[in-house]
Amino acid sequence: MEPLAFAVLKGVTPADVECELWDEKVEKIPERLETDLVAMTVETFTARRAYLLADRFRAQGLKVVAGGYHPTFLPQEALTHFDAVVCGDAETLWPQVLLDAAGGRLQSVYRQPAGGEMRGLRYDREIFGGKRYGRVTPVQFSRGCRFACDFCSIHAFYGRALSHRPVDEVVAEACALRSRYVFLVDDNLFVNVEALRGLLAGLKGCGLRWGCQISLDVAADENLLAAMAESGCVAALIGFESLDGANLVQMRKKWNTRHPYREAIARFHAHGIMIYGSFIFGYDQDDRDVFARTVDFALENQLFLVNFSALTPTPASALYARMEKEERLLYSRWWLDGGYGYGDAVYRPGLLTPQQLTEGCRWARGQFYGYRNIARRVLWPAPGCATFGHRLISLAANLTSRHTLDRKLGRPLG
């Protein structure tokens, strides 16, 4: 999808500053750039590649600035490759960064506290012109999450701060999009119930088909599920994470145990909302049988997509601090290590070897995304999700996921 961070920055860039976007997901970045300033958004999985590019452009005499999750968590590491780092959400700081760069007085670190006003944000999508992105367009309503799962970097970035854009601004933006397919990129759409009800009422007449990430507890509110469906929701990503209650307690997600998974899934399906289930393997109660049990659960409950991930401690998360304290990490900084391949285990699990965790995750993905199971999901979808539109979305999403995993798994970062 389009990287919204750059639409936000373009929206606050003065008109006399020329901007050009290069996105390595859809095009090759030139060896040399004719520019005064290079800005990159960096996540942990892209840090090694970003550092290689930053070194290349600095060697050409260009100033390079980094923003995003990873530099916010590890600014001193990023500063060994970048001239400046923006910590936190960047839109309020970006005009000052541009002024400082133009005046030759770029600071090493710029910090924006978490939270703050989102009113009036303008996502200037002209920056994406001419690029071959998918048909699904990202839209942001809110930032932050009211939960604090120990594996998650969202809480490390935003803390307890929660904020959302005015409903009328989001609805106006979404209804004006060329695409009729939208993904609401909020980390958890179910944060402010009244604001969400207003958003759903506004989207109801837009003729959109949309998906989101949302916490399982929304399933307890039948009226809200109905409003989601009526406003065009066709798919929701749910973080089930584990079928084991002790694991959920350890990951600080005990609240998931209050909502029986099968009943919650059935409620979504009854409203015509397909479920993309997210599961994490490798918590301390997981043994060699966990992979087959979880695949069976996903197939039996007719999830249309899944994400089976090896537990991966990321910087600044409570999980990383615990693993580091317990001396269970296999790499000092796995995101920079040339021996790490995408999807590999990076620590020593409790009841599995690192190799068993890596291979078990790959086996589970292979089972779920086998062509026979993809065909079954498309031909015999979940109750309430059997329209031609549902089937088409399911087929496209499954084939894309299978292709993406085939390309990425085991490959070194960078």
Image (cartoon, helix red, strand yellow):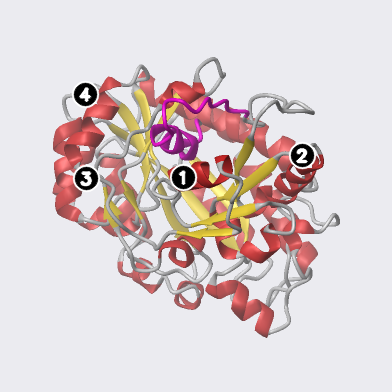
What residue type is disc 1 on?
Trp
Single out the residue that lies furthest toward the front: 103
1 or 2: tag closer to the N-terminus: 2
> Are the residues tagged 1 and 2 within 8 Å (C-beta)?
no
Residue, disc 2: 61
Q: Helix, strand or loop at disc 4?
A: loop
Single out the residue that lies furthest toward the bottom: 326
Q: Nearer the viewer, residue 312 or 219?
A: 312
In the image, 299: left or right of 313?
left
Q: Nearer the viewer, residue 301 or 410?
A: 410
What residue type is disc 4 on?
Cys
Residue at 50%, 52% (x, y): give it.
278
Q: Nearer the viewer, residue 43 or 406?
A: 43
Residue 225 numbered mark, or none: 3
Residue, disc 4: 206
Other residues around mark 4 within 10 Å, as few (<14) / some (14–19) / many (≥20): some
1 or 3: tag closer to the N-terminus: 1
What residue type is disc 3 on?
Leu
Residue, disc 1: 94
Most common secondary structure along the magenta stretch: loop
Q: Is residue 289 visible?
A: no
In the image, 341: left or right of 116?
right
Q: Is residue 327 above or below residue 335?
A: below
